[in-house]
Image (tube, grey):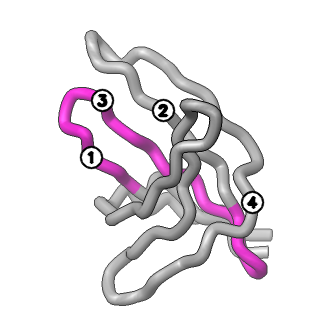
Amino acid sequence: MSYESVREPVEVLVAFRNNHPEPMMFKWGKQHYQVKKVNLVHAERVGREKVYYFSVSDEANAYRLSFHTETLGWQLEEMCVL
């Protein structure tokens, strides 16, 4: 298992289930990644901004996405190649 820090912007398709966002798919570069499972969600304050982190996985790898409430932007923080 190998962790790789990425920290690049991504486009995310999100569904809202029970008033909570759930990433369904994200686009990084020209590649699309289908989210099969949301493993963990947590939030933390970075200054005055609240950042939500989503640990997700597809059939091959795991990813950590972040949603920034001030910019409404998504970022791929890291990936784990299994």
Q: Residue 39 in the image: x percent, y percent?
A: 76, 48
| Disc 1 residue crowd, few under 14, some 14–19, many 20+, Cα 10 Å | some
Secondary structure of residue under mark 4: strand
On residue 37, the disc is: 4
Q: Residue 1 in the image: x percent, y percent?
A: 80, 70
Q: Amino acid at mark 4?
A: Lys
Residue placed furthest toward the top:
48
Q: Residue 3 in the image: x percent, y percent?
A: 65, 62
Q: Which residue is mark 1?
A: 73
Secondary structure of residue under mark 1: strand
Specify start and end residues of the magenta stretch as a single range: 57-75
Q: Which residue is mark 2?
A: 52
| Disc 2 residue crowd, few under 14, some 14–19, many 20+, Cα 10 Å | some
Q: Which residue is mark 3?
A: 69
Which image quarter: residue 46?
Answer: top left
Residue at 27% across, 11% down: 48
Closer to the chain start, of discs 1 and 2, is 2
